Image (cartoon, coloured by chain):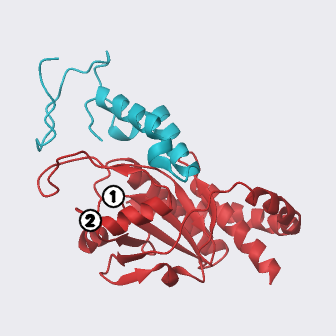
């Protein structure tokens, strides 16, 4: 896409979503699978940020598809 | 509005749960053995902390000894999950108080200390059960307790808390701690207020039998 994401904007500019869906889900419900996997991994791991790095990144990528930066 | 709904739910559920607890008493001793086995493999969550409550007072983990604790991590600008989960917590606490007694501290800890000073926390919690204690602190203090509970939280890079409207991503769990502050159990999003209340009541009755 030509437009770059601007994290500093107060109100998020609506971007054409890569996923073919007119209605964008709320942040809470956008990516339940990747979120649950990451949270469960963090809960079970004593060194979560490192051991769960792939799952953390997977969730970030999923959220980014909907235009959410987390 | 929210509190009325929580109260109605609490009243309706209390009667049923009371009967359940009567039944539960008979099985407490039997469950003791199960619990010993269940303890193996449980993550060691929790630990010492020093934070600021929503009245502006410095509190530590010692202030929450003597009763169970039910802990949730969120933030006041959380759009959807946190209000739902705090409604669930509010209802669960009402059920427990009605059926068993005032045996649990409900605690809400923010993952967004930059925008959640005590005043913001106090204002936010007005919509929920008045027994809920809001905890905030410095960024380092919040980071420390999130690590101890293995809560994932992150904010986008290069944001200005004063003017940017940003999301805080965080784990969604309830943590149940015993009166000595030791971790008992964790509940995910699919648990209901009745699940929470039932667990607290069961563990409370179990401890009562031991003494």
Q: Which chain is cyan?
A: A
Letter of the chain that mark 1 sits on in the rendering: B
Q: Position of residue A65 (x, y in %)?
A: 31, 26
Identify the residue at image location x=14%, y=49%. B164
Mark 2 crowd level (few <14, some 14–19, many ≥20, 10 Å Cα): many
Among the chains pictured, the one given red colouring is: B
Relative to the observer, which residue lies in front, B138 or B65?
B138
In the image, B19: left or right of A67?
A: right
Looking at the rendered structure, the secondary structure element under dot 2 is loop
Which residue: 28% across, 20% down? Answer: A22
Query: Could you say whether the residue bearing mark 1 is in a helix, strand or loop?
Result: loop
User: Residue tagged by mark 2?
Assistant: B116
Q: Evaluate whether residue B127 shows in this view.
A: no
Which corner quadrant holds the C terminus of chain B? bottom right
Residue identifier under label 1: B75
Q: Is residue B18 above or below residue B79?
A: below
* Label 1–label 2 contact, CB within 8 A: yes
């Amino acid at each position: 896409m030509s437009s770059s994401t601007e994290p500093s904007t107060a109100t998020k500019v609506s971007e054409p979503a890569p996923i073919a869906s007119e209605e964008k889900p709320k942040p809470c419900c956008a990516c339940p699978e990747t979120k649950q996997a990451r949270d469960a991994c963090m809960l079970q791991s004593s060194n979560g940020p490192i051991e769960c790095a792939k799952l953390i990144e997977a969730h970030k990528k999923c959220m980014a598809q909907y235009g959410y930066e987390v | 509005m929210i509190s009325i709904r929580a109260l109605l739910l609490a009243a309706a559920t209390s009667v049923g749960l009371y009967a359940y607890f009567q039944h539960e008493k008979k099985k407490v001793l039997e469950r003791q053995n199960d619990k010993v086995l269940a303890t193996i493999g449980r993550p060691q969550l929790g630990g010492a902390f020093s934070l600021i409550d929503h009245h502006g007072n410095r509190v530590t983990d010692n202030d929450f000894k003597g009763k169970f604790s039910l802990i949730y991590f969120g933030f006041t600008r959380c759009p959807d999950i946190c209000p739902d989960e705090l409604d669930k917590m509010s209802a669960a606490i009402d059920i427990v108080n009605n059926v068993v007694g005032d045996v649990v501290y409900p605690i809400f800890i923010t993952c967004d200390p930059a925008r959640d000073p005590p005043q913001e926390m106090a204002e936010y919690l007005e919509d929920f059960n008045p027994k809920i204690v809001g905890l905030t602190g410095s960024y380092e203090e919040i980071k420390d307790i999130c690590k101890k509970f293995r809560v994932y939280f992150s904010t986008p890079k290069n944001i200005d808390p004063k003017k940017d409207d940003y999301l805080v991503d965080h784990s969604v769990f309830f943590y149940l701690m015993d009166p000595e502050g030791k971790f008992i159990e964790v509940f995910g999003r699919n648990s209901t207020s009745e699940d929470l209340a039932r667990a607290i009541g069961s563990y409370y009755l179990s401890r009562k039998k031991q003494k």
